[in-house]
Amino acid sequence: MRTAIISDSHLGSGSGSDLLGREQFVETLLAALEGTDRLVLLGDTIELRDRPVGEALDASRLFFEGIGRALGTGEVVLVPGNHDHRLLGHWLERVRDRTTTVELDEVVEAPHPIIGQLDSWLGEATLTLRYPGVWVREDIFATHGHYLDSHITLPTVERLSIATVDRMGGRPTGRRSAPQDYEKVHAPVYDLLFDLAQGARNPQAQKNDGAPSMRIWEMIGGASGRARSWRGRALRSAVIPATLRGLERAGLGSFGRDFSAAEIGRAGVEAMHEVVDRLAVDAEHVIFGHIHRRGALAGEDGRAATDPVWERRGTTLHNTGCWLYTPAMLGRSSVRSPFWPGRMIFVNDEGPPETVELLADARPDELELPGSV
């Protein structure tokens, strides 16, 4: 059994940055799948938070039909993430029953009707939904990784929203020990964001303006960490620190003041370890997505303060990166950036997971959305 794993394609993204919505990159992926028996789509496969469901579904057809041709009678395992959380459908009723125990790898029964359409596009390939993760092999577990939003020290929108739900419920921030603990707090946040997207009327505006959080991050320095305007310097040195102190005093947790690309990776990996510990995942290797950060990269030996620590207590973490081209995240290093898209992970019958960079030789101008400046 040879398994391929990708995540974070965000098909139908309002920004137009979803590379697997374009035929040339779908063909690159399909060529790499030769000899593969199973493909795991490890979350955020379809972007259900930028636009109405029908539009996102239309944008994913090219991809799923191609996967069906490439795999033939093989298997596709879809693990929902936070951006396509609604694919779980009626499965979420399980977490409302306080007597129900949710396992680490469950087959999702009665998913959202969207799944029927995806299944038809896959042709003879078998489609299975599993959640919150899947045992790829008895020593390798894979999950999208959105549970780390309960623990990450970066003040993201989801981290703050989840902390607020905790606070309103009178719970200590981030106190979890099982999948149902996470779902009871995370699911309401994901539901709200999904519902807001269903009222979207102008995806083109999202494409032109980008996410507010990304614009703020760029203003305070972005990938370089150096703000280029007085507004950015004021935000970074005074406004944001004062806001974070207020959030901490309000009981929403502790937050770092480093917003560099390196810190995004380091903090994300630390939160990944936290999820592994809290869920007691007994595996030699755990594969995540979610943070869009490839890992581990050459030279990351843990010696530098900003190096993510990928191995701890006998468990090695891996990350699938993403299939989004987001220039603001790449900085000057471009293809050497931890956020360069196009990673795939392969798992064979034995041995550690293997990583392949399918777009390592691509140029930025090839990845740019046609017609963009």
Image (cartoon, rainbow, N blue to C red):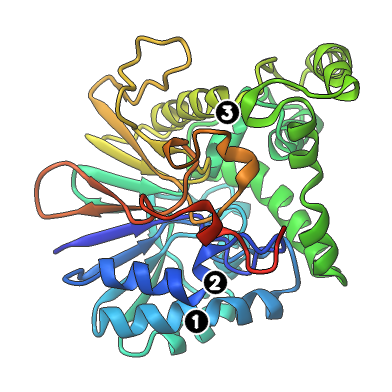
Q: CA distance from mark 3 to mark 2?
A: 26 Å
Residue designated by label 2: 21
> Where in the figure is residue 112, as x and y percent of width and height?
59, 75
Residue 78 at x, y percent in the picture: 42, 65
Name the quadrant of the C terminus. bottom right
Q: x and y percent of residue 65 in the render?
A: 43, 84
- Residue shown at 37%/20% (left/top)? 309
Residue flagged by tag 3: what amino acid is it? Ala
* Mark 3 burial class by Cα count in 10 Å: few <14, some 14-19, many 20+: many
Q: Is residue 228 above or below residue 202?
A: above
Q: Nearer the viewer, residue 209 or 72?
A: 209
Q: Residue at label 3?
A: 261
Q: Nearer the viewer, residue 358 or 127?
A: 358
Instruction: Tell me which residue sits at (24%, 44%) in the image.
Output: 140
Q: Secondary structure at mark 1?
A: helix
Answer whether residue 373 is visible to the viewer in this image.
yes
Farthest residue, direction left? 350
Q: Number of marks in the image?
A: 3
**Secondary structure category for the residue under label 2:** helix
Q: CA distance from mark 2 to mark 1?
A: 7 Å
For label 3, the SS is helix
Q: Residue at x 44, y 42 (%)?
A: 335
Crowd rating for badge 1 (residues with CA inside 10 Å; few <14, some 14–19, many 20+): some
Give the CA separation, mark 3 to mark 1. 32 Å
Badge 1 is on which residue?
Answer: 62
Amino acid type at circle 2 is Gly
Camera-side residue: 72 or 218?
218
Q: Earlier in the sequence, mark 3 or mark 1?
A: 1
